[in-house]
Image (spheres, rainbow, N blue to C red):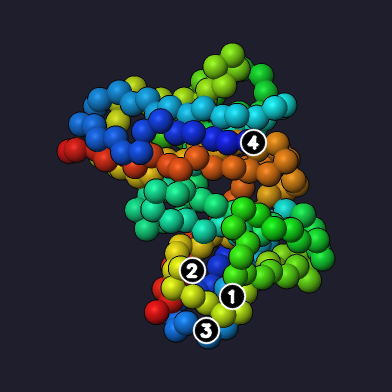
Amino acid sequence: EAQVTQNPRYLITVTGKKLTVTCSQNMNHEYMSWYRQDPGLGLRQIYYSMNVEVTDKGDVPEGYKVSRKEKRNFPLILESPSPNQTSLYFCASNEHRGGTEAFFGQGTRLTVV
Amino acid sequence: AQSVSQHNHHVILSEAASLELGCNYSYGGTVNLFWYVQYPGQHLQLLLKYFSGDPLVKGIKGFEAEFIKSKFSFNLRKPSVQWSDTAEYFCAARDDKIIFGKGTRLHILP
């Protein structure tokens, strides 16, 4: 079954404690991206990757890092989380940069206290 | 700048009412358009998409959307809504990267 898998689904952490949210897709997609969803703001892209070892900033990259060492995995790293990063995060993948629709993971609800 | 605007932030309808959610985009060239739905507590799922051809696109669960190039619009419609359509709906557009509208919360009264 084609899917995008994020872990964990829920996470509560303290300010400054580094964390990683994993994302994996089994569709051999080149393009992967991370979004955060906040009430009234819709989805905003944090980072995206067009292929292995190719990553670029989205609209709201501050405070986040990503890596793309393998095609299937695209982890999101918060080196020093802050309360304003409390949000709902979605990973998505596409076949290629322009064209097909995005497939989304189940989401990770992060709370930073 | 590329952008997607959704006209209504919150819509409340009774069951069996007709639905139209507005979406306008601002893109310079060829654009692909999408509507996604997010049921409470779930991730985004694709409702329908337009790439080219017939501007009237039919999606899942009885939804359809019409691409009107002259108006830069891609409105979502459903003739008769059900309680189970309660969700948040996102319009999206992409050429280089995908951009989402801010979403419309639809609440259907039983």
Alpha-carbon distance for marks 1 and 2? 9 Å
* Residue that mark 2 sits on: A85
Label 2: state its secondary structure: helix
Badge 3 local density, few (<14 within 10 Å), some, or many (20+)? Answer: some
- Percent coordinates x, y for residue B9 in the rendering: 35, 38
In the image, are marks 1 and 4 on the same chain? no
Q: For the residues marked 1 and 3, what is the alpha-carbon distance in whole angstroms?
A: 9 Å
Q: Amino acid at mark 3?
A: Gly
The residue that label 1 is drawn on is: A78
Residue A16 tag number = 3
Q: Report in which chain the residue with disc 3 lies.
A: A
Q: Amino acid under label 2? A: Gln
Residue matched to label 4: B1
Residue at 55%, 52% in the rendered image: A44
Q: CA distance from mark 3 to mark 2?
A: 11 Å
Binning the other alpha carbons within 10 Å of mark 1 as few (below 14), some (14 to 19) or many (20 upward) gives some
Nearest to the eye among marks 1 and 4: give it.
Answer: 4
- Residue B89 visible, this orientation: yes
